[in-house]
Image: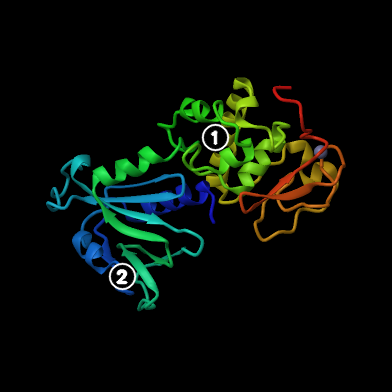
Amino acid sequence: MPEGHTIHRLAQDCAERFLHAPVRVSSPQGKFADGAALVDGAGMTSAEAHGKHLFLGFPGFAGSPGPGAPADPGNTAWVHVHLGLFGKVAFGSAPPPWPADTVRLRLAGPTAFMDLRGPTTCALITPGEKQAIHDRLGPDPLRADADPDAAWRRISRSRTTVAALLMDQKVVAGVGNVYRAEVLFRHGVDPYLPGRALTRAQWDAIWADLVELMREGVRNNRIDTVRPEHEPEAMGRPPRVDDHGGEVYVYRRTGQACHVCGLAVRTAELAARNLFWCPGCQPANVPGA
Ligand SMILES: [Zn+2]
């Protein structure tokens, strides 16, 4: 499952390639053929992400506003994409090759094309339906309109562990297993601490850190979370070898020495996902410490 920075990066990549250019929209696989036909040939008016949801805007169902006309956000047809576990996106230069029949959605612009395969969701939705999706998602650290207070109201009332709350898309949108593990490590927070035992100051620091780390994730298209003093060169250690790339403190480092205290990193299953933490740097039973 990609983390939110991947989807924001995808929105940026779509905007760079297709915004305001005539885009041929098709569904070689056929499952999205009706939706594709309604927006085919129009200029894409916007591309944005909220958590793990991608939204591509096209002139509304009533037709194109015409060249140079301002886009009417109330009359936008949105292509809503959720990659789920198996969705994959590939970009290439125009002209595109003959598509494989596994391609759910193809966008083809003057200079580039994009193929989407295997998403959980690829559907054409109205502005109202899009708003309903925003309304059920928590604030996304990568969105300018995010309200961290909305997440705090839920966290500060909850007996659920802070590790589970961070992964709950209704509480915070876009945080996945890597950022969850790493941000709790960076703030010395026990992953099993109940949400309501977290202090406001801790939450503010965690949120600010998520904003910064995830922005860097979008820029570099990978997750790096170690501070300069813990980078391989600074510590004289070999770089991490992992297909996820990036330098991290605890994610998938079970049994290896913590870069800060030297204790072995631990793992456990929580809500069907592996949790990683350092028992030295994230001690239990110190709520608000
Ligand atoms: Zn440690």
- Of the 4 image quadrants, the one containing the N terminus is bottom right
Residue at 57% in and 29% down: 208
Q: Earlier in the sequence, mark 1 or mark 2?
A: 2
Question: Residue 261 placed where, x, y %?
Answer: 85, 37
Identify the disc placed on residue 211: 1
Q: Secondary structure at mark 1?
A: helix
Give above or below for 194 relative to 61.
Answer: above
Residue 57 % position (x, y):
28, 49
Residue 77 left/right relative to 286: left
Q: The residue under label 1 is which amino acid type?
A: Val
In this view, 167 is above or below 109: above
Question: Total number of numbered labels?
Answer: 2
Q: At 42% from the left edge and 40% from the top edge, which residue is drawn? A: 137
Q: Residue at x 65, y 45 (%)?
A: 224
Q: How far across and down, in percent of the image, does residue 193 sit?
A: 68, 33
Q: Give the residue pinned by disc 2.
A: 31
Give the mark toward the camera: 1 or 2: 2
Which quarter is ligand 1 in?
Answer: top right
Q: Quadrant of residue 135?
A: top left
Camera-nearest residue between 92 and 265: 265
Residue 201: x %, y % from top left: 62, 21
**Quadrant assignment, res 147:** top left
Query: Marks 1/2: CA distance?
Result: 36 Å
Circles 1 and 2: CB atoms closer than 8 Å: no
Tag 2, which secondary structure? loop
Q: Is mark 1 within 8 Å of ligand 1?
A: no
Along the line of sight, the residue nearer the viewer: 216 or 34: 34
Quadrant the C terminus occupies: top right
Query: Foreground: 113 or 183?
Result: 183
Dot 2 amino acid type: Lys
